[in-house]
Image (cartoon, helix red, strand yellow):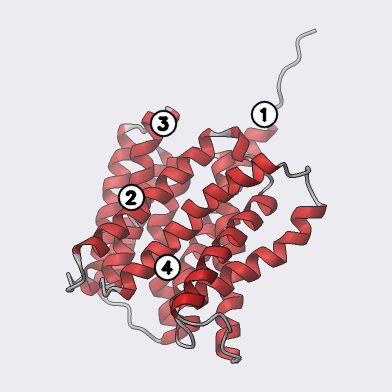
Amino acid sequence: MTCVPSPAPVFHRRWLWPVLALVMIVSWSSGFIGLRYANEEAGMATVLFWRTLMSGLILLPFALMIGPRMTARGVAEQMVFGVAAVVLYLGGFAVAIAERVPTGLVALISDMLPLAIAALSQPVLGEKLSGRQWAGTAVAVGGVFIVSFDSLTVGEAPLWAYGLTVASTLVFALASVMHKKRPTLRMPIHQALSIHTLTGAAVFGLVAWWQEALMPPLTAHFAFGIGWLVLLATFAAYGVYYTALRLYPVAQVSAAIYLSPPVTMIWALMLFSEPLTPVMFAGLAVTLAGVAMTWRG
């Protein structure tokens, strides 16, 4: 007798995607807010060290007790991925900002991540984007430029610092595509994220020890910022991102990041009373339209 597969998994994926996308957009954009809180009390390397260390230590007991036994090869592969997705991505932008690349330009380049992923997904994964999806990508990029227009300046940073922001974006894009391509990287999310963050903590710790200080400032302000970064910008953002990569096309998942700049500005309005201009609202509307075209395509 022929067994007919149940359509339930497809149905569940359809209603699950809007939920995952919403959580990813909110949590991804929250990283800028958490960094602003914590960076007022300590240097960037110290903030990144405590963010990754606390994230990894919280996840470590669950990684050791829950899930399949981790092999040395699996841990080594995840450490390499962690260097790309955590150290080079976060650290690259931190160095660029420290070298006085304007923050608005850094944010704009980082938000071109979905475009880089879309370009890599076809030759590496064979996930071909339709004409409608490329059109939606172009519209979303235009919306991001509109949102970021008021804050864009060129600055006087060294040329290599600008290149570093582009390289950081490309490294994370390539890491995302390879995560989708290599089945050996598909370790349970809590185990993989624990290895990634502890790897990041080791590198950021060395940098903080050399340049700043390992000891955190004992203030409620700093503790709140680190808690924000651990729970929202690490557990929610990275966890949901990796989960969505396993369920949906990589270009579809990454397109949600285009909504990060306008949502970040809404965070800033609510928490810091930073104004939203009509140009920003126009950019938000354009970005929403582009992302909708990409998802439907």
Looking at the rendered structure, the kind of residue marked 2 is: Gly
Query: Hey, which residue is sitting farthest right in the picture?
Result: 65
> Depth-wise, is mark 3 or mark 1 nearer the camera?
3
> Depth-wise, is mark 2 or mark 4 nearer the camera?
4
User: Quick one: label 2 or label 1, which is nearer the N terminus?
Assistant: 1
**Element at badge 2?**
helix
Question: Contact, CB < 8 Å: mark 3 with mark 1?
Answer: no
Q: Quadrant of the N terminus?
A: top right
- Can you give x and y, in whole percent of width and height, for residue 22 in the image? 53, 58
Looking at the rendered structure, the kind of residue marked 4 is: Val
Residue at mark 3: 124
- Can you give x and y, in whole percent of width and height, for residue 202 in the image? 57, 64
Q: Which mark is residue 290?
A: 2
Can residue 82 be seen here? The reply is yes
Q: Quadrant of the C terminus?
A: top left
User: Quick one: label 2 or label 3, which is nearer the N terminus?
Assistant: 3
Question: Contact, CB < 8 Å: mark 1 with mark 4?
Answer: no
